Image (tube, rainbow, N blue to C red):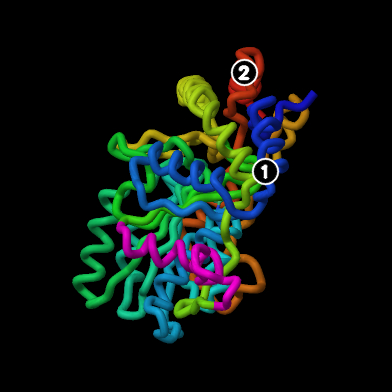
């Protein structure tokens, strides 16, 4: 039997009861469950300016739309550049293309696997409008340094750069003791099927201010005020939008799972503490660095290894699930135009692999993982 890298965390039978209630309510698309879910997430994060969406991918696109199409009838900013990190799932970056924006790669810091903030400082230009970065595996980026770099770049080039944090893997992660989504940027969480907190499919966008939140909420559903008298045709869309709202079935699932997620997160953290200790001195294996002020969510446990094919083979033989999760995004032919040298990423991407750390591991599973790796490959 294989120890899986991911497992769906479903709080049964509560999730079933919640969905049954939604199915019988006559309100499937919009209703009280999504509103309650949104309020509950806001309360957990300590940020009231949150908008529930049908996926993190939609949330990222919604956030980007505010950057380059800022006002009611203002045209899109076609020269806008967005600085992106290539070591992530494709969902982080393809919304930039969906919005018709120009994507520019920033290198990866081989120590953290997150965006290289020194390279970010070099890449901000007068055309930069947004920066999209990921907290890979739920290991937070150093948000203090990020802010200093962005402030300096904005002052030097006379621009305003909106920072969008892809927190898809980071439910429960904190920086300086505060959840991601409360540090002055736009933050996007995923509640997809294999995320720690799941709606089946869903997400939330957290904004730093009420004005961006208000505009995003309107654009989430076509730009239509749902409380207007649509029956009579008495409504106007000044600022068109998308179909990105969270439906009632998914919200019901999310509400049930939210009640159980804290215990699961604790188990990810204690399992990670075991791996931190047991894998600290293994020849040919390097752990991923994180800032002192960061408390990760440990969605998976990333490591860097010599002879990755040998490592993958050895763990497969031992019944331990692993994955590379994503291909470096700059290698895809759809973004061939954006190719630039990325020496940091080159130095590390053949060595990265993810091993299980989640709530489903028994003590025996955890010991089996560390013993197998410590025995070499
Ligand atoms: C899962 C994931 C997404 C996409 O989330 P969806 O809710 O499925 O759209 C985006 N970015 C990262 C890093 C992810 O892991």
Q: Nearer the viewer, residue 115 or 36?
A: 36
Quadrant holding the N terminus: top right
At label 1, counting other C-alpha atoms closer than 10 Å, the crowd grade (few under 14, some 14-19, many 20 or more) is few
Q: Which residue is mark 1?
A: 25
At label 2, counting other C-alpha atoms closer than 10 Å, the crowd grade (few under 14, some 14-19, many 20 or more) is few
Which of pointers 1 and 2 lies earlier in the amino acid sequence? 1
In reply to whether residue 290 is colored magenta, the answer given is no
Q: Which residue is mark 2?
A: 371
Visible residue check, residue 101: no
**Residue at 61% of width from left, 39% of height from top?**
252
- As helix, strand or loop, the secondary structure at mark 1 comes to loop
Q: Residue furthest top?
A: 364
**Residue at 68% of width from left, 38% of height from top?**
19
Q: Which of the two marks, 1 or 2, is nearer to us in this view? A: 1
Q: CA distance from mark 1 to mark 2?
A: 52 Å
Residue 150 appears left or right of 274: left
**Residue at 37% of width from left, 78% of height from top?**
71
**Residue at 63% of width from left, 56% of height from top?**
327
């Amino acid at each position: 039997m294989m120890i899986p890298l991911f497992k769906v965390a479903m709080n049964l039978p509560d999730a079933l009861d919640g969905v049954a209630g939604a199915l019988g309510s006559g309100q499937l698309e919009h209703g009280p469950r999504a509103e309650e879910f949104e309020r509950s997430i806001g309360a957990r994060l300590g940020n009231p300016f949150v908008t529930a969406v049908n996926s993190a991918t939609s949330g990222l696109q919604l956030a980007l739309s505010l950057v380059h199409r800022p006002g009611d009838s203002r045209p899109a900013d076609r020269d806008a550049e967005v600085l992106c990190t290539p070591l992530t799932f494709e969902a982080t970056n393809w919304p930039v293309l969906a919005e018709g924006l120009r994507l520019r790669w920033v290198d990866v810091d081989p120590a953290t696997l997150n965006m290289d903030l020194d390279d970010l400082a070099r890449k901000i230009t007068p055309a930069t409008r947004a920066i999209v970065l990921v907290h890979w595996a739920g290991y937070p980026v150093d948000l203090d340094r990020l802010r200093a770099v962005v402030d300096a770049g904005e002052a030097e080039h006379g621009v305003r750069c909106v920072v969008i944090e892809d927190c898809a893997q980071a439910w429960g992660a904190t920086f300086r003791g505060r959840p991601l989504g409360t540090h002055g940027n736009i933050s996007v969480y995923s509640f997809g099927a294999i995320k720690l907190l799941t709606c089946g499919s869903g997400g939330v966008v957290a904004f730093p201010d009420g004005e961006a939140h208000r505009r995003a909420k309107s654009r989430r559903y076509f730009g239509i005020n749902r409380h207007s008298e649509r029956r009579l045709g008495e409504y106007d869309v000044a600022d068109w939008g998308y179909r990105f709202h969270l439906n009632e079935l998914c919200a019901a699932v999310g509400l049930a799972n939210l009640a159980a997620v804290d215990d699961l997160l604790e188990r990810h953290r204690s399992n990670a503490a075991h791996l931190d200790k047991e894998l600290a001195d293994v020849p040919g294996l390097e752990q991923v660095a994180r800032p002192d002020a960061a408390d990760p969510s440990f969605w998976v446990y990333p490591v860097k290894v010599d002879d990755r094919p040998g490592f993958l083979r050895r763990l497969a033989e031992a019944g331990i699930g692993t994955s590379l999760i994503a291909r470096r995004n700059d290698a895809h032919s759809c973004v061939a135009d954006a190719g630039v040298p990325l020496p940091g990423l080159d130095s590390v991407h053949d060595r990265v692999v993810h091993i299980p750390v989640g709530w489903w591991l028994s003590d025996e599973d955890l010991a089996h993982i560390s013993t197998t790796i410590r025995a070499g490959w």
